[in-house]
Image (spheres, helix red, strand yellow):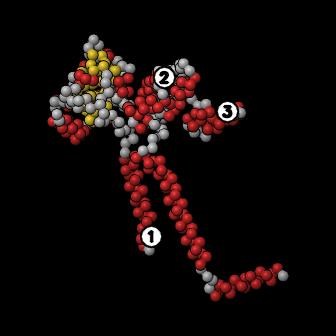
Amino acid sequence: MKLRFLIPLLAFFALVGLLFVGLSLDPRELPSPLVGKEAPDFDLPELHNPEVRFARDDMLGKPALFNVWASWCVTCRHEHPMLTELRRNGVPVYGLNYKDTRSDALRFLARYGDPYSAIGFDESGLVGIDYGVYATPETFLIDRNGMIRFKHIGMITPEIIETRILPLYRQLEAET
Amino acid sequence: MRPLHFLSAPLLLAALGLPLSAAAQSGGPTAPPSEPMTFETEEQEVRYQRLIRELRCTVCQNQNLIESNAPLANDLRRQIALMVNDGAETNEIIDYMVARYGDFVLFRPPMKGTTYLLWFGPGAMLVIGLGVLGTILWRRRTQVGSAPLSEDEEERLRRILGEGGGDKA
């Protein structure tokens, strides 16, 4: 008989548990269907020099970070030192300058430094659409064969570098 | 559809403060005038209008592509218009969007392993709820029905009935 009175209490705690999990999920963190798939192909003018092309295949051969950014994106400015830090740790960092103007982007790099090995200038945002970009900054970790192995939406923090990016990068480096 | 109905449904919804997308079938918003999309056939126009109502804007997550003013929604509308004009099938365009942004862009999620709970959860909850209600009501009915009157109560009942009969006579 006593057990019957416990049922509503248990149901209540089950509901609290459900809400606790549900409300602590970030609805902006969408699982990307691109993780585990090949990085979409592109061939763009390079940001610094429109005569030079920068294609997806230029990133292959070594695992690399591919960072989507824009000068109008405030979070990208905060994130910028993290990319410099990754570069210092030996991670090649490539950029996709998303829906920006060349002069604004170059001014941004002149002011905050340029950790990128090469930057694709995606003025129309079409390459961004192919990469499922919806909130800059977004960062992809691509292995040596061009497979996307990890995606992070929003700012890279020191914690994410330590716990996710660097360990996975070392693992990808060891892969043949 | 008579003209009166055609007018009154969106007006009523607007008055109730409901989002206009609910009235999409009977008018509703069309693409912003700043970006005129031209189509070769009316069928393409219809397909485009249907697609941008069914696909979600990933930036403003509670709006579909037609409602959103986000630059990305603008780009995606243009991309969809291009694909429609190129003769892409509706499901090709949906596949294109899902390949990039995931099932999240669909306001009608597909039925598969991870979405069974979403699709059947409400129905299952209704069945469970009705089951619990039915059980409680059934038990109560049998409890009430099986309780016999004590002798005192029988006596009181006879007296009350007797008095009632007396008044009438």
Identity, as a three-letter code, of the amino acid under mark 1: Arg
Q: Quadrant of the C terminus of chain B?
A: bottom right
In the image: residue A163, left or right of residue A24: left
In the figure, residue B139 lies in which quadrant?
A: bottom right
Which residue is depicted at the point 30% across and 33% down? A37
**Are the residues flagged by discs 3 and 1 in contact, CB closer than 8 Å?**
no
The answer to whether residue A38 is visible is: yes
Identity, as a three-letter code, of the amino acid under mark 2: Gly
Give the CA separation, mark 2 to mark 3: 34 Å
Which residue is depicted at the point 59% across and 31% down? B28
Counting from the top left corner in percent of width and height, residue A24 is at 36, 47
Counting from the top left corner in percent of width and height, residue B85 is at 49, 21
Give the CA separation, mark 3 to mark 1: 55 Å
The answer to whether residue A84 is visible is: no
Which residue is depicted at the point 31% across and 24% down? A41
According to the image, label 3 marks what residue? B7
Give the CA separation, mark 1 to mark 2: 63 Å
**Residue extending farthest top:** A51
According to the image, label 2 marks what residue? B87
* Foreground: disc 2 or disc 3: 2
Alpha-carbon neighbours of circle 3 within 10 Å: few (<14), some, or many (≥20)? few
Local SS, label 3: helix
Question: Mark 2 or mark 3, which has the lower sequence index?
Answer: 3
Local SS, label 1: helix
Q: Quadrant of the N terminus of chain B?
A: top right
Alpha-carbon neighbours of circle 2 within 10 Å: few (<14), some, or many (≥20)? few
In the figure, residue B111 lies in which quadrant?
A: top left
Numbered label attached to residue A4:
1
